[in-house]
Amino acid sequence: MLTTLLTTLPLLLAPPPNTPYTATKQRVEAQRLAFQRSYLAADSAAQLAVLDSARNYLFDRITLEMLPAWYGTPWDFNGITRVPGQGKIACGYFVNTVLLDAGFRLPRIKWSQMAAEPITLKLAGTVKRFRDRPVSEVEDWLLKRGNGLYKVGLDNHVGFIVVRCGKARFVHSSYYHPEVGVMSEPLAGNNPLANSRYRIVGSLLDEAMMRDWVLGRDLDRN
């Protein structure tokens, strides 16, 4: 859970003025290196504080800048674009591209072509499976955990769930609306999350994942 005061995630939002996506990536990488220096110079107790600060920072950058920059990028089953708003992107490529651009060392192509479950198990600190359960049960579980970023794997789809200030949003490259593609929408409704019989939800940005981010370690080493 994140403890900082957070604002509501908007439905559709362009990147901040004068802050293109490439500049956001550069700022995130510079801050990652700053966290790394602080972490390596700290004792074990202070290292935990560094990881907590890094988590809050990265949660904001991903949810308020990086994800919104992709909104409106069209979906295509074979979409592999690296640039928001240019070309098309499939659901798995969207998830792994955002994580890669946020500074996580991962095999983008390999993971984007794999099933969601084994990757979720690699990344997530906590995993919860829901089979033939109403989407309201998923949302209740998420909201009880508080603010956070989650990866969700479905019958035939993958995306993020962002929980922020008591609201949960499903952020994904939607094959239901391929001309819109990447969007943020409620968990309930006519969408792949609500209509899937199976869901695996994994919490991202936990202590181990953030340590790998700060130290620049490969997430696919196991």
Image (cartoon, grey):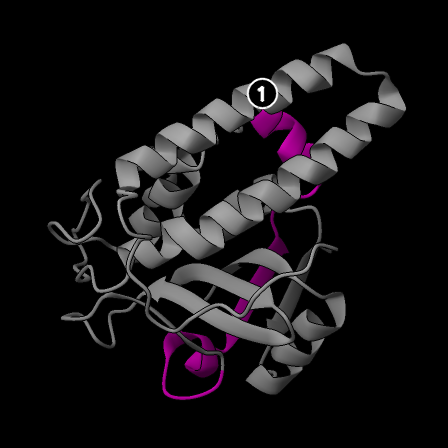
**Residue 44 to residue 7: above or below:** above
**Image point (56%, 73%), residue name:** 168
> Is residue 171 a member of the stretch shown in magenta?
no
Magenta-colored span: 188-214
- Mark 1 sits on what residue? 34
Residue found 42% across the figure and 88% down from its top: 189
Q: Position of residue 218 (x, y in %)?
A: 52, 22
**Percent position of residue 13, x then y:** 33, 65
Q: Is residue 221 left or right of residue 142?
A: left
For residue 111, which quarter of the picture? top left
Quadrant occupied by the N terminus? bottom right
Residue 199 lies left or right of residue 64; in this view the side is: right
Is the residue marked by circle 1 packed among few (<14), some (14-19), or many (20+) residues within 10 Å?
few
Residue that extends furthest to the left in the rendered view of this protein: 87
Mark 1: secondary structure? helix
Answer yes or no: is residue 218 visible: no
Question: Does 209 lie within the magenta span?
Answer: yes
**Residue lying farthest front?**
18
Residue sitting farthest toward the right: 45
Q: Position of residue 76 (x, y in %)?
A: 16, 59
Residue at 25 percent of width and 55 percent of height: 90
Quick one: quadrant of the C terminus?
top right
Name the amino acid, label 1.
Answer: Ala
Q: Is residue 123 above or below residue 39?
A: below
- Residue reaching furthest to the top: 41
> Camera-side residue: 124 or 98?
98
- Residue 169 in view: yes
User: Residue 16, relative to residue 168: is it above or below?
Assistant: above
Is residue 136 positioned above or below 28 on the image? Answer: below
Percent x, y of residue 107: 38, 30
